[in-house]
Amino acid sequence: MTRHKKQDDEFVFLPLGGSGEIGMNLNAFGFGPEEDRQWVIVDIGVTFGGPDTPGVEIIMPDISFLEEQRSNILGIVLTHAHEDHMGALARLWPRLRCPVYATPFTMYLVKDRLSEFGLLDSVELRDVPLKGSFSLGPFDFDMITLTHSIPEPNALVIKTALGTVLHTGDWKIDPSPQIGEPVDEQALRELGKAGVTAMICDSTNVFTPGEAGSEEWVREELEKVIREYKGAGVAVAAFASNVARLESVMMAAKENDRSVCLVGRSMKRLVGAAKSVGLLKDIGALLSEEEATSMPSAHVLYLCTGSQGEPRAALSRIAAGQHRNVKFGEGDVVIFSSKIIPGNDKNIFALQNALADDGVHIVTEKDRPIHVSGHPCRDELTRMYDWVQPEIAIPVHGERRHLLEHARLAKSLGIKKAYPPRNGEMIRIAPNGPEVVDITPSGRLHQDGTAIVSSLDEGLRLRRKMAYAGHVSVSLVVDQKGRIISGPEPRISGFPEGKNGEILEVLLDIVEDAAMEGYDDLSQRALKDEELIEEKLTSKIKRRVRERTDKRTIVEVIAHKVKT
């Protein structure tokens, strides 16, 4: 039970990821006086690197504030198992070391991930049943069933002595989700009648009118599309986490006398997780890749990872002819039962072009209604506000424009107070909220190989600069009087070579000439100081390279002094 409130108690909300961006969700709730506040963390997700983060694939929220509060953190509560909500758990848990709470499907995947990192025996894991309740210090939690594009999406009711918050997590209103129960409308209405101080709510599709649509529609359409390719080889690419979609594909295959073969590690992992909690019961036997390749293609359906064009995913390897078992060719069809996530456009189109070059027919959600979103559109948001009637609307899970539009929508629906937060803003919900009461450190952590470092790390900054502007190094050996014994010897990386290396040769000559000119300009005092030699030559070379290439290149000069 929640404890009685004290005079200095505050109920605060702190987003550290997911407010101002889609993905990398991490939210914290605090209760108590500032000097003795207790915290719970809701979700701890990742986003993924791209061209602007060379060498970095995994990006996480900066949790430096929470690390300072570690002794006051009561637990991490996960709303569902998408990577942007739980993908950073194993990577960041060693910095937090607190219990983890999740429902069965999510917990299965948590254990799988912790095992990969050698942490399974270290983390205190607490299973929560669907529609379950539990307490952490001054917080009482109730789980409310919602629908989304993964099993067991939960809204969290967080009750304290100062008020109640509904944290929706990711959701939509699907009357026929195919797997799991529909949205628990009665529980939400009862919650609204009891009084909700604030609702923290998904903003992803706030600009999209109407409703997201039902998984039932997709299942019916997939059955029709697959039937149209009778006699051809068929593959479907989908998000492995969308277990309802996987079941829809499997049932559509069954209706068309095809057996399913899973292709891709995450596809097999998610199907295993679903089966572990009693899902996917009626899908029949699944074929191994070896069994599938020995059967007529007209009786097989390949269910593949790689719908976003990920270079190492199964579908990309198949398109490149690098998969050891599965091949697609003239007359086959690949059905993309997914949307294009912004930023993945180039990879997806490159994959589809490679398949088309091999004579494979492509079907996407632009051609047929074979995908629906997992997030609420405007009509669904309107219904949620009608049910819950919070005093305060706090939009999250969206870019800045999404949050601002969501706040406007909430006010138009009669919600008196709405605040679109920024990561790092500590917002007092009660009493007398919303009000920003503190600004905490926020930003991004990059996983660079085995190291996790700030996105502002100097080494990562230099790598980004090298990726755009190249690198020049020059070495020379001087005696104690500053006379050149060897060099200057230039080395250049990251510049175009040109035909037969002509461009590179010209640039090498320019660098060497600039180094000699810089050396000739040195004073007698500078000639005897390696650091001054390096500084003056670096300045000269940078200027000449920029004049030639219009690039602010990284230049490194190393002067070695030896005794003669």
Image (spheres, rainbow, N blue to C red):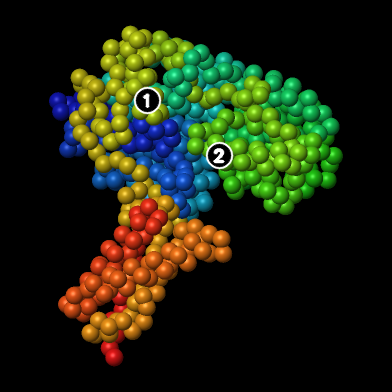
N-terminal-most mark, 1 or 2: 2
Nearer to me, 448 or 309: 309
| Label 1 to label 2: alpha-carbon separation | 24 Å
Residue 330 in the figure: left or right of residue 127: right
* Location of mark 1 (residue): 401
Q: Quadrant of residue 439?
A: top left
| Residue 351 locus on image (x, y percent) | 63, 41
Label drawn at residue 16: none
Q: For the residues labelled 1 and 2, say whether their Cβ atoms are less than 8 Å apart.
A: no
Q: Residues within 10 Å of mark 2 (few under 14, many from 20)?
A: few
Q: Is residue 171 above or below residue 299?
A: above
Task: Find disc 2 in the rendering and name its residue.
Answer: 346
- Nearer the observer, 179 or 148: 148
Can you give x and y, in whole percent of width and height, for residue 58 in the image? 45, 47
Mark 1, other Cα within 10 Å: few <14 / some 14–19 / many ≥20: some
- The image position of residue 262, as x and y in percent, is 69, 40
From the image, which quarter does the C terminus lie in?
bottom left
Q: Residue at x 43, y 64 (%)?
A: 507
Q: Is residue 250 visible?
A: yes
Question: In the rendered image of this protein, does residue 261 appear above or below residue 479?
Answer: above
Which residue type does callout 2 highlight?
Answer: Lys
User: Residue at 30% of width from left, 75% of height from top?
Assistant: 559
